[in-house]
Image (spheres, rainbow, N blue to C red):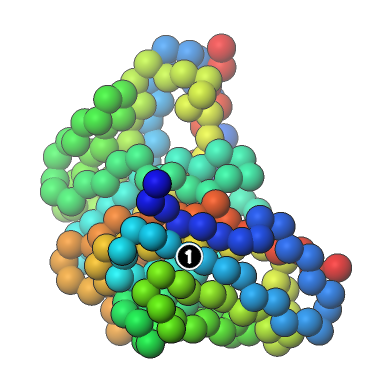
Amino acid sequence: DGGITQSPKYLFRKEGQNVTLSCEQNLNHDAMYWYRQDPGQGLRLIYYSQIVNDFQKGDIAEGYSVSREKKESFPLTVTSAQKNPTAFYLCASSIGGTSGASYNEQLFGQGTRLTVL
Amino acid sequence: QKEVEQNSGPLSVPEGAIASLNCTYSDRGSQSFFWYRQYSGKSPELIMSIYSNGDKEDGRFTAQLNKASQYVSLLIRDSQPSDSATYLCAVNMISFSGSARQLTFGSGTQLTVLP
């Protein structure tokens, strides 16, 4: 079955550590996204990528980094510079990119819940 | 700052009733609108998309769009306890940096359907 796989489901990090969240999709989608969700809030965009080897900052990119070496994969690294990393992280993908009058539907993975100890 | 506003709720309706969820947005140039359902502790699931003014029906769900009023709504007919979830409205809007359109989410409306 086609879908978006995020791993791990739960992740614990000590202060000062970098951690990497995995996101893989087999939908042949060009665009991929990372969001952060805090309790009782909507989703905020961290980074997005419309094509391999290219990515753009979202609204809250500070303290995060990404790479897009393969179409199927878009890992997110939460660095020690992120002051409040405890949150629910969601990866999404869509067929097309973010520009144009018709915005493509985004589908989500099951999420990674990150907790800083 | 471009915004998407939803009533946070919680909204409670009896089983079998119609649940009405509302969303307003600030970017008059927005062209694409989505409703996601999110169960507690789970990721959002796309349930409706709408691009043109008017109504779009899919089973028990109807999305309504009025671009002139910058308003989009979701109606759930014959509500079931399994519909109890948080519903997120998402609108494509000019990004914070102004360089591209991106999906902006409201904070969600929590719906409880009472048996």
Q: Residues within 10 Å of mark 1 (few under 14, many from 20)?
A: many
Q: Which residue is mark 1?
A: A24
**Tag 1 secondary structure:** strand
Which chain does tag 1 point to? A
Residue A89 position within the rendered picture, expressed as x and y whole percent measured from the top left: 59, 63
* Residue A98 percent location from the top left of the image: 28, 72
Q: Report whether A81 appears left or right of A102.
A: right
**In the rendered image of this protein, does residue B88 appear above or below residue A99?**
above
Q: Report whether residue A82 is seen.
A: no
Answer with the quarter of the image where residue B54 lies: top left
Q: Residue at x 26, y 37 (%)?
A: B63
Residue at image location 38% in from the left, 30% down from the top: B20
The front one of B16 and B48 is: B48
Determine the residue positioned at 47% across, 18% down.
B80
* Kind of residue indicated by mark 1: Glu
Q: How many marks?
A: 1
Q: Quadrant of the C terminus of chain A?
A: bottom right
Where does the image place residue B18, in percent across and percent down from the top left? 37, 20
Kindly indicate the quadrant of the structure image that contains residue B106: bottom left
Placement of B99 over or under A4, stated as above or below? below
Q: Is residue A12 left or right of residue B103?
A: right
Q: Determine whether A96 is above or below B62 in the image.
A: below
Instruction: Please name whichever residue, A2 or A80, is drawn nearer the observer in this view of the structure.
Output: A2
Image coords of residue A95 (percent x, y): 27, 63
Q: Which image quadrant for residue A11?
A: bottom right
Image position of A21 (left or right of B100)? right
Task: Report if residue A24 is visible in the image.
Answer: yes
**Of the pair A68 and B76, the residue shown nearer to us:** A68
**Residue ranking furthest to the front:** A1
